[in-house]
Image (spheres, coloured by chain):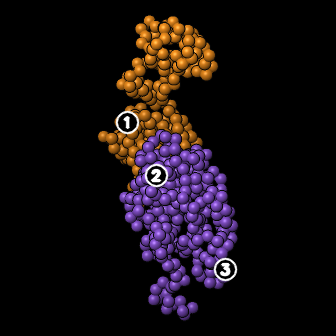
Chain colours: A purple, B orange
Amino acid sequence: MGEVIVVTSGKGGVGKTTTTANVGTGLAKLDKKVVLIDTDIGLRNLDVVMGLENRIVYNLVDVIEGNCKIKQALIKDKRYPNLYLLPSAQTRDKSAVKPEEMKQLCDQLKGEFDYIIIDCPAGIEQGFENAVAGADRALVVTTPEVSAVRDADRIIGLLEAHEMKKTDLIVNRIRMDMVKTGDMMSSDDVVEILAVNLIGVVPDDEGIIVATNNGEPLVGNDSKAGQAYMNICKRIIGEEVPFLDLAAKKGFFKRLFGKKK
Amino acid sequence: MAGSVMIKGTKNGITLVLDENEEYDVLKEKVEKKFSESSKFLGNAKTALAFEGKKLTDEQKDELLKVITDNTDLDIVCIMDNSAEANAKFAQAVNEKMFEQLAGNAKIHKGNLRSGQSIETDAGIVVLGDVNPGASLISKGNIIVLGTLRGTAWAGVGGNKNCFVICSDMMPVQLRIGDIIARSPDHQGAAVGKETKIAYLDNDQICISPLTKDIINSLSL
């Protein structure tokens, strides 16, 4: 029986879609059978980040409305044969799907997949209700900014109201140089406010922008962000992985010149 | 019994379902009542009619047809046979006829089409502007974009394989002509200069080529 994980944040632009793409791809790399569902109807992005936009024929709304079978709408990833995407509709809006329908869909997919990862839209309205309806577990993404943390707190409250079984926190786009100078909250500061289990810290990385534009998630490569995402995936499947030392300098030369400054 | 006469709307027209165990005269009366009641709802559409259930003679069919036309503003174009094969043939014939009528017609859209916007029409489509990714053009006929096509275009919905897509700059995410789908390459090569191109079907494959005089001459409109 598969597990349904919703990736949510409240605030927009903190990296829900990027996290969904990377965690999904990472779990597929760990030989799990994974399906990603984009529930951001009307503002779909996950297909673009995954580089699968040109393969879309049917979408989530078509499945819900019975215009096609689930199998027909699932897009097989171009890199991993055990990774699938159920894209969202672009020409409709959130009201095209009801929470009960999402729950039914998740229950159907659970039989066939190890992990069903749902990309939640920003906000706390119907799109959020749809996304969390069928979920067993939530990953709350936030950046170390007061506004994002405030919204994450609100979302965690709503998840508790929905009786979510398990809620984990991802602190995204952290910059250790700014944390050191005291200009940015550390992941510990964020955890202290939100009081939920921290499952990963992802550093700010230009590579993410390149990966997003190329439609190829960077999870598992040797960049810090790629490793951080891979560690999150391993923790999701229950492995104990120590947190990365994000403050560590990269290589010999950097260390050499770093000291001189 | 209320359910002995039922009106069903189908893709191709109206189906009248008649109870097999009912006398013809009773049915006729009920048909009259049913259609006069729903005359407003049915409007004055041009439609086809099919019978289901009770076997009728041709005279009886004619009689019922008269009852219907007398009691509603419907314009019954023809009576269909209700077998699947006949239905498919009928749908195809209607499609072809529609295409003939619409080939010369086009919906003209001024301005850019942005993500989430779409134009869906039985006629052709002409866009004076760009079509961005996430926007879609869906037409039973041909599609012409005087601008850059970056979104999705579907010409010849319903299976017409003679339809084409022309645009000043061809960079679609996905193209569909008739029932055939083609997607963009995963890795875009170096950008080539803007050139008006046409996409058409050749042996059930979507081909894209520059719009030359020869090709224009060979187009069937």
Front: mark 2 or 1: 2
Task: Write down the residue under mark 1.
Answer: B161
Q: Amino acid at mark 1?
A: Lys
Q: Distance between the Cα atoms at labels 3 and 2?
A: 44 Å
The answer to whether marks 1 and 3 sit on the same chain is no
Residue A109, disc: 2
As displayed, is residue A140 above or below residue B79? below
- Examine the image and state in which quarter residue A170 appears: bottom right
**Residue density around tag 2, few if under 14, some if 14–19, many if 20 or more, within 10 Å:** many
Q: Residue drawn 55% across and 61% down?
A: A137
The location of residue B170, given as percent across then percent down, is 44, 50
Front: mark 3 or 2: 2
Q: Is residue B201 left or right of residue A26?
A: left
Q: Residue drawn 57% across and 91% down?
A: A261
Q: Distance between the Cα atoms at labels 2 and 1?
A: 36 Å
Q: In this orientation, which residue lies closer to the viewer: A257 or B147?
A: A257
Q: Amino acid at mark 3?
A: Asp
The location of residue A205, given as percent across then percent down, is 53, 73
The answer to whether marks 2 and 1 sit on the same chain is no
Q: Earlier in the sequence, mark 3 or mark 2?
A: 2
Task: Write down the residue under mark 3.
Answer: A183
Q: Residue drawn 43% across and 36% down?
A: B156
Q: Decide: marks 2, 1 in contact (CB < 8 A)?
A: no
- Examine the image and state in which quarter residue A10 appears: bottom right
As displayed, is residue B13 above or below residue A16? above
Q: At numbered mark 3, what does the secondary structure look like: helix, strand or loop?
A: loop
Quadrant where the N terminus of chain A sits is bottom left
